Amino acid sequence: DAGVIQSPRHEVTEMGQEVTLRCKPISGHDYLFWYRQTMMRGLELLIYFNNNVPIDDSGMPEDRFSAKMPNASFSTLKIQPSEPRDSAVYFCASSLLGTTGNTIYFGEGSWLTVV
Amino acid sequence: GDSVTQMEGPVTLSEEAFLTINCTYTATGYPSLFWYVQYPGEGLQLLLKATKADDKGSNKGFEATYRKETTSFHLEKGSVQVSDSAVYFCALSIYNQGGKLIFGQGTELSVKP
């Protein structure tokens, strides 16, 4: 089975540019999560969706960040405009409610550098 | 609120040494507990999990027991290998939030030959 698929794997962009990160969750999963990993703050939950509906976006750092899930098989995380402090690894993850332990499966991450 | 605390790293061990990485948690309900591993330059992989008190999760020689009385989920391995060098994350999940994970800060393990 294909796991969570993220793109791009690596992105280098200039400050002020728009960045769009993409995620395809595991087929059949009904929860999707976006996490950010930095050295300073560790792993932070940015937002999560249930059945394509955003449930909790309290972790989104500011208005420059937005996330959408137009259908069950696709989500985007957009940063506009990007800033150097947004440099981080962004992970998408998915899970299926009701499964034992509600295991969350992570993608390989999108490694973003803003210069 | 719910939280996870891990022992500080980095931890440096010689090959075949015994490993313990401490993890304690605070939770209002009865969470599931997880250990994830992140190898250099890679994403997070589930290592093991336990869903209720006294459960023991195990995988690849690693073990952890869900101790409700001490709110702990310490990771152990009897004999580490160089290939175990990675960052290990303890986490708890909240069932009624889709299994949303709250992570500890991570513990870097370096195993020397």
Image (spheres, rainbow, N blue to C red):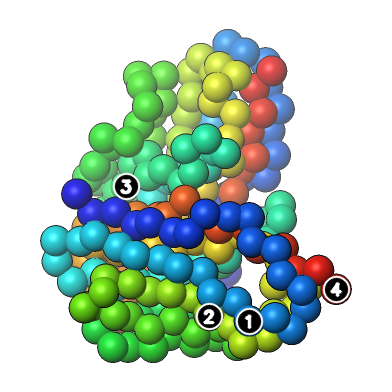
The residue indicated by pointer 3 is A48
Whole-percent x and y of residue A77? 46, 35
Q: Nearer the viewer, residue B79 or A91?
A: B79
Residue, disc 2: B76
Q: Chain of mark 2?
A: B
Instruction: Please name which of the two marks, 1 or 2, marks the residue nearer to the observer.
Output: 1
In this rendering, the count of numbered labels is 4
If you read the primary sequence from the N terminus, does the residue marked by circle 1 or circle 2 appear first?
A: 1
C-alpha gap between disc 4 and disc 2 = 19 Å
Which labelled disc corresponds to residue B113? 4
Give the alpha-carbon distance from disc 1 to disc 3, as whole Å. 38 Å
The Cα atoms of the two marked residues, 3 and 2, are separated by: 31 Å
Identify the residue at image location x=47%, y=38%: A41
Query: Which of labels 3 and 2 is toward the front?
Result: 2
Is residue A108 visible in this depiction of the protein? no
- Residue B77 pos. (x, y %): 59, 83
Q: At 62% across and 87% down in the image, what residue appears?
A: B78
Q: Are marks 1 and 3 on the same chain?
A: no
